[in-house]
Amino acid sequence: MTPKVRFHSLGRSAYTPTLALQEQLMKAALEQKKLRRDAGLEGQDRSDDLTLYLPENHLIFVEHDHVLTLGKTGDVGHVVASEQRLKDLGVEYFPTNRGGDITYHGPGQLVGYPILDLEQFYTDIGKYMRMLEEAIIRTCADYGLETGRIEGLTGVWVNPEAGLGARKIAALGVKCSRWVTMHGFAFNINTDLQFFDLIVPCGIGDRGVTSLSKEVGKTLDDEVVKSAVLKHLGDLFQWNLSEAV
C-alpha cells in the first residue's frame, strides 16, 4: 500500500489559523481511526463502507509571520526579550503542545507540518524524526552544504562534529497521538537570524543558529528550496502526494 498524502501550500500565514488547521486535520484522523477500531477494521487497508477508509494524511508547507512557540517541556525563561520588545518587533508568542523548547518562526523559513497516520507508514517515532531530518540534510547537500545530526539533540546541524562550533539550520518538534502526528520542522532558508537573539533557541545556549542562504553566501529562491524538500520527503516516505482542494 502506498499512503496517500494531501499537500497544502499555504504561502505566508499567521500561526493561529495554521495551528487550527493542524488540530482540525488531526482530530479528523483520530476520529476516523476510532471508527475503524469500533468496526473491527484496524489492520485492514479499507472496508466497503466509504466512511471507514483509512484516515487522511496531510502535509502543510507554510511561512509564518514573526512568532515564538514554546514546546510543552520548554522553559519560558528561554525567551530573553521583554514583552515590550516582542511587541515592538511584531513578534507573537504561543505555548504549544509539541515537544521541544522555544523556537522562532518567520519570513524566509520553511515550516513543514505533516499530519500523518504513522500506522500507514511505520510505528517508530524516532525513525519518523530522523526521516524529517534526512530530507533537510539531502536538500542542503543539493546546495553543496554538508550537514548532519548531533547525538542527543534533534534537528539538522552544520559542522555537527565541531562541538560548540556547530550551527543549527533546522529545528524539529512534534506531537504524536495514537500514531497521528502534528507540528514538524522549521528550516532556515533566507531567515533573518537576528530574531533568534530574542530567545535561547531550542533551549541550547552554547551553539549557534544559521540559514542555508548564510552558509552558501547568497539569497536563495524559497520556492526552489521548498520543491527540493518536498521531493526528498517523497523519496523517503514513498507517499502518493496530491494537492489539497
Image (cartoon, grey):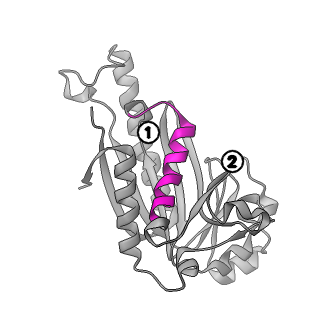
- Is 133 one of the magenta-colored residues? yes
| Closest to the observer, 93 or 4 | 4
| Closest to the observer, 52 or 100 | 100
Name which residue type carries label 1: Lys
The spot of residue 28 in percent (x, y) is 38, 38
Q: Which residues are magenta?
A: 121-139
Q: Main secondary structure of the magenta part?
A: helix
Q: Residue at x 77, y 62 (%)?
A: 163
- Of helix, strand and loop, which one carries label 1? helix
Label for residue 27? Answer: 1
- Is 112 one of the magenta-colored residues? no
Q: Total label count?
A: 2
Q: Quadrant of residue 88?
A: bottom right
Q: Residue at x 80, y 70 (%)?
A: 80
The spot of residue 46 in percent (x, y) is 24, 24
Question: Where is the C terminus found, in terms of image quarters?
Answer: bottom left
Q: Which residue is mark 2?
A: 72
